[in-house]
Amino acid sequence: MKKLIQIGDYIINYDNKKTSEIYSKEINIKEDCPCSECHFFVDVITKLELEIFQILKKVGTDLEKNLSSEPTGVWCIRDDNNEFIFFQQTYLIKGFILEHTSFHYEKEELGLRINAYFTNEIDDIIIDLQVSKMNVT
C-alpha cells in the first residue's frame, strides 16, 4: 500500500511493505564485513536518534543492511581515538518523489552534519546519506 511522507518541502510516495521486502533479502552489514568500522556503524551509529534514521525506518528501510546493488556497503571512518568522524551509506525506498526528480535533505543535530541526497531511479528512490562530525579539526 502506497503512503505519503513529507520531508521538508518534498513529498515522497512510498510503499513500506515493498521496501521492507527488499531489505528482508539483503545481508546484514556485520555479516557482510568483519571490520570494526562496520560493526561500530551498526552497534553505535544506527542507534542514534537522528531524524533521518527515523524517516528511513518509517518508510521500511533497514539501517543495518547493505544493498546488494551497492557492493561497497557502508563507509565509516573513526580517528585514532576511536571517535566517529564520517559515514556514507546508500539506502533505497520503493516509491518516487512527487513533482521533483531529486532533493537534498540537510540538517545538523547531535553535533553531526547530515546530508542526504534523494533521487528518483525508475521505481525506486536512492538515498546517498553522508554524516560527518561537526568541528573536526
Image: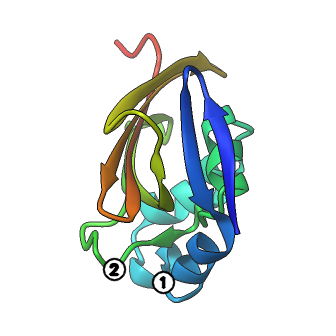
Alpha-carbon span between mark 2 and mark 1: 7 Å
Q: Secondary structure at mark 1?
A: loop
Q: Quadrant of the N terminus?
A: bottom right
- Please state the horizontal and vertical placement of residue 96, each as a whole percent of the image: 45, 52
| Callout 2 amino acid | Ser
- Considering only vertical position in the picture, is 63 above or below 18? above
Residue 100 location, x and y as percent? Answer: 37, 33
Q: Is 135 left or right of 51, judged from the image as shown?
A: left
**Residue 71 visible, this angle:** yes
At 60% from the left edge and 47% from the top edge, which residue is drawn?
45
Label placed on residue 26: 1
Which residue corresponds to mark 2?
68
Mark 1 nearby-residue class (10 Å; few <14, some 14–19, many ≥20): some
On the image, which quarter does residue 35 sit in?
bottom left
Q: Is residue 122 above or below residue 79?
A: below
Instruction: Check contact, mark 2 vs mark 1: CB within 8 A.
Output: yes
Q: Earlier in the sequence, mark 2 or mark 1?
A: 1
Question: Who is closer to the viewer here, 92 or 85?
Answer: 92
Q: Position of residue 84 (x, y in %)?
A: 49, 37
Q: Which color scheme is applied? A: rainbow
Residue at left offset 74%, top offset 38%: 49
Residue visible at 68% across and 33% down in the picture: 51
On the rendered structure, is 16 left or right of 96? right
Residue 37 in picture, x, y percent from top left: 43, 58
Choose between 36 and 1: the one closer to the eye: 1
Q: Is residue 15 above or below residue 53?
A: below
Circle 2 Cα neighbour tier, 10 Å, few/some/many (<14 / 14–19 / ≥20)? few
Residue drawn at x 30%, y 62% is: 122
Task: Point out the residue furthest to the bottom here.
Answer: 25
- Of residues 96 and 74, the one drawn nearer to the viewer in this rendering: 96
Secondary structure at badge 2 equals loop
Three-letter residue code for mark 1: Glu
